[in-house]
């Protein structure tokens, strides 16, 4: 019988073999990554989304907040001061806010947070209602447009389905939204995650503060600023600025028509 020949690999051959195996593995990983990327691109959501701010856009919270701070501080805190406070909030830290608006930091730190939340919940339940005309606009939008509706808000109470239904019924919000995006401290981060996770291509932002409108600028979403909440006309940089909720329907319909044309024919030259 002939003896079987044994294959002996030299160190150089072993190195070449390892290099080839590594190259093949890396190539396969790159191909897998390309496949995953392609699948993500395929699943982009081209349905238009309407993103509404909640406080100051859909519902009037200024007077309820004025009563909240007046009760908590034990001194008058008028609505105009509330508006100023909420405009300063994204720009100033908590210490700077307390100094500017003469909040007693010890009162806030020692049980104050839970106390002000308790008062706020009471005042919101009693005094917060949708702005005149908002309910009708929402009902019409839900009925006639091919778009999804969402709320973007700091109001984390709206996260809970049961609580949200009670609040909407009490405040006069007559529809069920397709999504509620809430985060007490950083709603921009939550909003970004929502957009990127779903691959949303087309959106319209409706809000009463510049911070709300700026949420969509990263994604080239259209913006509608409203003046019945916390900001005046000259404080809002948006594609449209309106003074009456009844103007919303026509503008949104026009923007949705533009989106449909863009989907059909691409960007105009």
Image (cartoon, grey):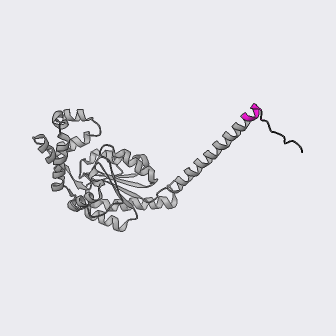
x, y percentage for residue 201? Answer: 45, 54
- Number of numbered discs: 0
x, y percentage for residue 18? Answer: 69, 37
In depth, the one of 217 and 36 nearer the eye is 36
User: Is residue 185 placed above or below 260 in the rendered structure?
Assistant: above
Res 32 visible: yes
x, y percentage for residue 124? Answer: 18, 53
**Quarter-of-image position of residue 103:** top left
User: Is residue 250 placed above or below 90 in the rendered structure?
Assistant: below
Q: Is 23 placed left or right of 176 in the picture?
A: right
Magenta stretch: dominant SS? Answer: helix
Q: Residue furthest front?
A: 1
Tell me which segment is drawn in magenta: 9-14
Q: State which quarter of the image contains the N terminus.
A: top right
Residue at screen point 33% across, 62% down: 250
x, y percentage for residue 63? Answer: 16, 50
In depth, the one of 229 and 149 nearer the eye is 149
In depth, the one of 77 and 230 nearer the eye is 77
Res 77 visible: no
Assess whether residue 147 is covered by the magenta stretch: no
User: Is residue 169 placed above or below 195 in the rendered structure?
Assistant: below
Residue at screen point 71% across, 40% down: 20
Residue at screen point 28% across, 50% down: 156
Q: Residue furthest bottom?
A: 143
């Amino acid at each position: 019988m002939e003896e079987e020949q044994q294959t002996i690999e030299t160190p150089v051959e072993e190195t070449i073999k390892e290099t080839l195996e590594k190259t093949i593995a890396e190539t396969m990983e790159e191909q897998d990554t390309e496949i995953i990327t392609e699948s993500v691109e395929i699943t982009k959501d081209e349905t238009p989304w309407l993103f509404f701010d909640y406080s100051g856009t859909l519902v009037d919270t200024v007077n309820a907040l004025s009563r909240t701070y007046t009760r908590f501080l034990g001194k008058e805190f008028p609505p105009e001061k509330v508006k100023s406070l909420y405009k300063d909030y994204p720009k100033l830290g908590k210490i700077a806010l307390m100094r500017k608006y003469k909040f007693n930091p010890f009162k806030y730190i020692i049980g104050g947070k839970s106390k002000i939340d308790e008062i706020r919940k009471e005042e919101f339940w009693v005094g917060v209602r949708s702005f005149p005309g908002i309910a009708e606009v929402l009902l019409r939008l839900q009925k006639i447009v091919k778009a999804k509706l969402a709320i973007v808000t700091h109001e984390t109470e709206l996260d809970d389905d049961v609580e949200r239904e009670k609040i909407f019924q009490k405040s006069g919000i007559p529809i069920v939204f397709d999504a509620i995006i809430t985060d007490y401290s950083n709603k921009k981060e939550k909003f970004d995650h929502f957009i990127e996770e779903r691959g949303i291509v087309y959106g319209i932002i409706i809000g009463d503060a510049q911070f709300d409108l700026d949420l969509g600028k990263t994604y080239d979403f259209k913006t509608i600023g409203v003046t019945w909440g916390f900001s005046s006309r000259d404080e809002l940089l948006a594609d449209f600025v309106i003074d009456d909720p009844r103007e919303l329907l026509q503008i949104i319909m026009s923007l949705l028509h533009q989106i449909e044309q863009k989907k059909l024919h691409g960007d105009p030259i």
